[in-house]
Amino acid sequence: MVRRTKADALATKADLLDAAERLFSAQGVANTSMMQVAEAAGVTRGAIYHHFDNKLDLIDSMMERVSLPFDQMLEQTSQRHVDNPLALLRARLLNIVELLQRDPHTQSVINILFHKCEYVDETLPIHFRHLRARNNCIEECILLMQQAIDHGQLPKTTNAAKLVVCLVAMIDGIIYNWLLDPDYFNVVEVAEQALDTFMAGLQQPA
Amino acid sequence: MVRRTKADALATKADLLDAAERLFSAQGVANTSMMQVAEAAGVTRGAIYHHFDNKLDLIDSMMERVSLPFDQMLEQTSQRHVDNPLALLRARLLNIVELLQRDPHTQSVINILFHKCEYVDETLPIHFRHLRARNNCIEECILLMQQAIDHGQLPKTTNAAKLVVCLVAMIDGIIYNWLLDPDYFNVVEVAEQALDTFMAGLQQPA
DNA sequence: TTACATACATACATGCATGATTGTATAAAT
DNA sequence: ATTTATACAATCATGCATGTATGTATGTAA
């Protein structure tokens, strides 16, 4: 009804993204219409189609918003672990879980990715972003584990690639199950326990 | 067009369930219409609504079909492990993965549950079945781990409940990731590695 | 001040998807 | 042999959801 300034437009866009995050996370992507998102943001569908091409573009923008802090986290190499790749590996994986527990945006978006969005061709561009991030994470973990082997922190016979898949899958599984019922257990606690137990097991030869 | 015998009707029903399994697993539940399912089964929508109340009922029947072999598997207590609860625990979890690798029906249905179906209120009855099975599994695993502690196979200080959550989450995560890209790794191999490493870690005190 | 671009609201056209109803040919029961 | 129930096909009515096109009031630049 009214015309707004450039800053107001950005606020509207953010409102739309917030509303989408909430609604998608609560009711699922396919089950939420553009109309509902607009209403929740206090505008009409016209506003959405002004800011986003379509539903997919809306979701994509939503994802991009949280991928930023995630990428930042990955880049910061803790100085404390410069000569302790195994500890860094542990810290890296734990950081993901801690970010998840701390930031509600990350929580909603990961929840959408895991439980509220079908993994189909139509939504492929969204999942590509997710997969790329995951592969980056795996690659870095393999690198770190390899360094740990070279540093003598792990047995020479350690199969880094295979064990990193186990490790990352374990974290994925913990997040997956926690999001299903966040009151059932504490993510960070369980993740720590899981990491410690698994990494203790790494010391034993097969 | 034609009228069939009672056995033929059952065949039609099975065809519909098969078609639904394939299509849902390939394109997602929300993205697949009753029309498509009917066409894939070589009948019209009339046939579906004769055999099933609606889409949800169709999905539910689909799930029920595979829950049978799954439940059977859980009931068979291997005689080899009567006095080795830790080995039985390992065998139980590995059995799930082996069943998954072996049976394409289980594969499709678990794939639907994990990746092709939004976890929303509307589909709650479906996920309840899944959650119930998972909780049964967790409870039995806790029981077994407790027995292992009593048998002296694990340290007295072992926190069974917490560690079983880690274990089951790890298997979940492996399955989750494997279904995303079945060619990336061998489920059974990785699951064995994961179980062995984690259970080796159980021997170490915190 | 005029001209244009921006930020939406409103209205419209279209396209499925669902569920219900009805029709019908055949098996099964009596 | 007749009746009835079954197993579908075919049609219909309805309801969203999407995308687009248009209108309009306001900021913004010249």
Image (tube, coloured by chain):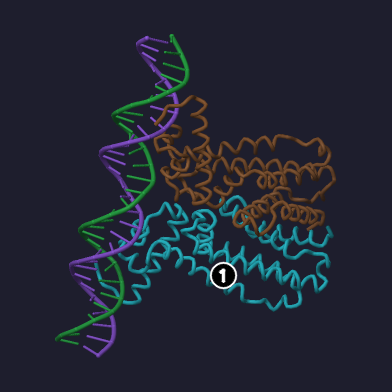
Chain colours: A cyan, B brown, C green, D purple
The residue identified by callout 1 is A70
Evaluate whether residue A192 shows in this view.
no
What's the residue type where badge 1 is placed?
Phe
Residue A140: percent from left, percent from top:
67, 71
Q: How many marks?
A: 1
Q: Is residue A125 visible?
A: yes
Instruction: Give how far across and how far down residue A144 sits, in percent.
Output: 72, 71
In the shown orientation, is residue B15 left or right of residue B87? left
Helix, strand or loop at disc 1? helix
Which residue occupies 42% across, 51% down?
A: A31
Nearest to the observer: residue B135 or residue C13? C13
Q: Nearer the viewer, residue C16 or B147?
A: C16
Image-quadrant location for residue A13 = bottom left
Decide which of C26, B123 is in the foreground and name it. C26
Spot occupied by residue B27 in the image (x, y as percentages of width and height): 49, 51
Q: Position of residue B77 (x, y in %)?
A: 75, 35
Q: Residue at x 81, y 35 (%)?
A: B79
Q: Position of A196 compared to B27: left or right?
A: right
Q: Quadrant of the N terminus of chain A?
A: bottom left
Rate crowding at label 1 as few (under 14), some (14 to 19) or many (20 or more) other CA atoms within 10 Å. some
Q: Chain of mark 1?
A: A
Vertical order, C22 against B89 (above or below): above
Residue ID at (48%, 60%): A123
Q: In the picture, residue A24 is in which quadrant?
A: bottom left
From the viewer's perspective, is residue A192 above or below residue D16? Answer: below
Image quadrant in which the C terminus of chain A is located: bottom right
